[in-house]
Image (cartoon, rainbow, N blue to C red):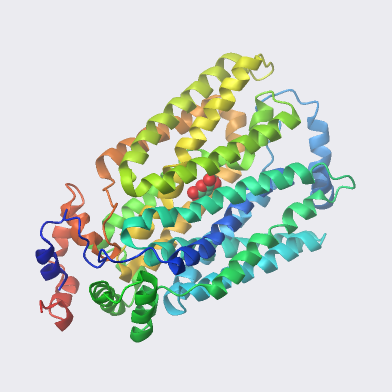
Amino acid sequence: MVDSFMAKQGSSSSPTLVGDPSEAKITPIVVISCILAATGGLMFGYEIGISGGVTSMPGFLKTFYPDVYVSTQKLKTHNSNYCKYNNQKLQLFTSLLYLAALVSTFFASHSTKKLGRKMTMLIAGIFFIVGSVLNSAFTNFTTVITGRVLLGCGVGFANQVVPLFLSEIAPTRIRGGLNILFQLNVTLGILFANLVNYGAAKIKGGWGWRLSLGLAGIPALMLTLGSLIVVDTPNSLIQRGKLEEGKAVLRKIRGTQNIEAEYLEILEASNEAREIQHPFRNLLKCKNRPPLIIAIAMQIFQQFTGINAIMFYAPVLFATMGFGNNASLYASVITGAVNVLSTIVSIFVVDKLGRRMLLLEAGVQMLLSQLVVAIVLALKVKDHSNNLSFGLAILVVVMVCSFVSGFAWSWGPLGWLIPSETFPLETRSAGQSVTVCINMICCFLIGQVFLLMLCRLKYAIFLFFSAWVLVMTLFVLLLIPETKNVPIEEMTERVWKQHWFWKRFIDDCEGDKSNRKYANQPFHDSK
Ligand code: BGC
């Protein structure tokens, strides 16, 4: 069916998109649903931004980690620039959330498939609310850690469902831009958290940490209410057998009666999906390998740009470089703001310039920025002395901002966008779980070992990350296909089958019995 449609449309580069008739409008319901759903990212960002600041607040340390508090006081006399903040137990508070997220995302996969996208968002919202309450209202260590785990479950569910929801509900031609709303919310969450920490740290009486942890309730509430308002995606409704409802939603969100082509395409994809008993095992089938490998590689690469070294520990990093406490906080608010603004840039250009162009440009920009920071630190900030002049300190901040902005219009959003749009429907939620899981494992690792690495590698930590950036940029150059303007249910035909390297996986599948069986189903016959 799709083939006959393709034939009618002419070549695969035809501007008229199959399944996305040109009259598909950017309707208010799509825009509103996307804005509401994307608040799941706000929660994730808030958690990324908040814990670094909270774990350095004396009130928090005295309550939960009294021994750590005592040793940080002693460390004030410690004179190694690179090692003063390294503490594994404390870093576990930051990274535990990611452990919980990586486990829960597999439950989320089941829920996105069986209960739908909307319901899964509601579950994420509830996890967040309970987690924020436990985190801020009690002074008992077990409760706070339980709260952290629940927040992690919220992140696991939200990161599983939101990018997927956005990719499915958006019309093809603005899919990239709408999907990046998730990442925009992540960056807003981080910035909001930086500002909250800045204010909370100044509160006399030592209860500022409660405010920081408790304000997570705001984004939690937004996602919960949002999930009650949004419509479920037609893909999810159709996949769960609600054909008429799916069709009606498709008409409503596309703002046209002419949705037959897209409807049939989703129906076909969901027929295939229904055949699949074990989506995770199915991920390993040859035709699913290209998106799987790309999703895994993209998550590892996204985290090994070193972005979270900056997002989790920006104040600590700037303090390491010799900035005073206030200056460090300001500097981290500045990088937070650059992160938000650059993400907005990508919303507008991703569907025009394409994914590859952004990843390649940013690769060069991030590489150069990290090299400059490494060189300045190597020359000026030794283990026991710091000769960073004012001018060089500004240069370091500018280079960190340049690195963050490169990340924010490339690996930040595209690390989530590309995996969410390249898996076929039958393995989309399983694929997204693997994506979230790998991302969280890498977040956990960076959260847990970065300060130790800084202590051991010193300025060379930036060389370490820049080597990764070089490798990932070559990976993009050779192996990441362009997916801009390709309808989501046509990736196999129009992307993988056309790619110089990945097509061999699909070719191998031609001999795969389990795929041949689809060819005999009535739905595949050309009508
Ligand atoms: C990443 C996070 C990161 C954030 C920074 C996200 O895409 O997954 O780990 O902290 O971008 O904006």
* Placement of the C terminus among the 4 image quadrants: bottom left
Expressed as whole percent of the image width and height from the top left, the position of residue 443 reads 53, 48
Residue in the foreground of this view, choosing between 454 and 27:
27
Location of the N terminus by quadrant is bottom left
Horizontal relation, residue 174 to residue 12: left or right = right
User: Could you tell whether 349 is left or right of 148 in the image?
Assistant: left
Question: Residue drawn 30% across and 63% down?
Answer: 488
Name the spot of residue 152 as percent of width and height, x first. Answer: 60, 60
Image height check: is 149 above or below 340? below
Picture quarter containing residue 72?
top right
Relative vertical location of residue 209 with respect to residue 345 in this rendering, above or below: below
Corner quadrant of residue 203: top right
On the rendered structure, is 233 left or right of 286? Answer: right
- Residue 334 image point, x, y percent: 62, 35
Q: Where is residue 424 in the image (x, y as percent from the top left)?
A: 29, 65
Against 452, is 509 above or below?
Answer: below
How many numbered markers are drawn?
Answer: 0
Instruction: Tell me if residue 55 can be seen.
Output: no
Residue 443 in sight: yes
Residue beneath the point at 54% across and 32% down: 401
